Amino acid sequence: MEDRLKNLKKVMNKRTFADLNFSDQHQKAIRQKINQQEESDEEILLAVMQLLVHEKTGHELTGLLRGRGIQKFENNEGLLYTLLHRLEQSGCLQTNWNDSGAKYYWLKDKGRKLLKKAEQKQTKRRLVFKELLEG
């Protein structure tokens, strides 16, 4: 478990859950729901853009997203290609077909600027959340 999650658990045990008792069945049900939660669209978009700093095919991208634990495209890669097409239409992505028929995607300057903004926003969110938990 990551340190920040351990700290969260400690703080919550001391403050929030001190007087609460959950049955084993209830705890198991909660864990299952947590494991079944899907990634937010914002998190997925950020991950896709981070991976496309360097040229990738859609197939490579799917594997790398799976490696990050993002499984939204596992049984429906069409969703990924729809997202890539939208990013291309918005001017964030550059694409090119190679001689073997593979399509490659990578971020254009506009996409890199948006990625930088999104990463800064995410960092600020983490800092605020950390401050709230530790304060």
Image (cartoon, helix red, strand yellow):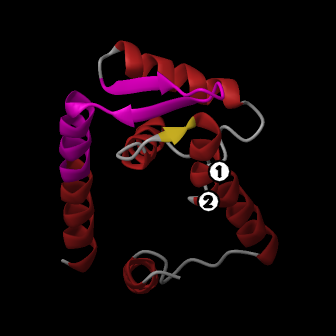
Q: Nearer the viewer, residue 1 or 65?
A: 65
* Vertical position of residue 100 compared to residue 13: above or below: above
- Position of 28 with respect to 71 (left or right) is right
Q: Could you tell me which residue is drawn at 44 percent across and 17 percent down?
A: 86
Element assignment for label 2: helix
**Looking at the picture, how far across and down is residue 39, in whole percent?**
54, 46
- Position of 68 with respect to 2 (left or right) is right
**Looking at the picture, how far across and down is residue 90, in whole percent?**
32, 16
* Vertical position of residue 16 compared to residue 39: above or below: below
Q: Could you tell me which residue is drawn at 62 percent across and 29 percent down?
A: 102
* Vertical position of residue 71 compared to residue 128: above or below: above
Q: Could you tell me which residue is drawn at 20 percent across and 32 percent down?
A: 109
Q: Nearer the viewer, residue 19 or 90?
A: 90
- What amino acid is at disc 1? Gly
Residue 18 appears in the picture as rendered: yes
Q: Is there a contact, CB below 8 Å, between mark 1 and mark 2?
A: yes
Q: Nearer the viewer, residue 20 or 106?
A: 106
Element assignment for label 1: helix
* Vertical position of residue 43 compared to residue 12: above or below: above
Q: Nearer the viewer, residue 99 or 78?
A: 99
User: Which residue is labeled 2 in the image?
Assistant: 67
Residue 38 appears in the picture as rendered: no
User: Which residue is labeled 1 in the image?
Assistant: 63
What's the magenta region?
Answer: 92-120
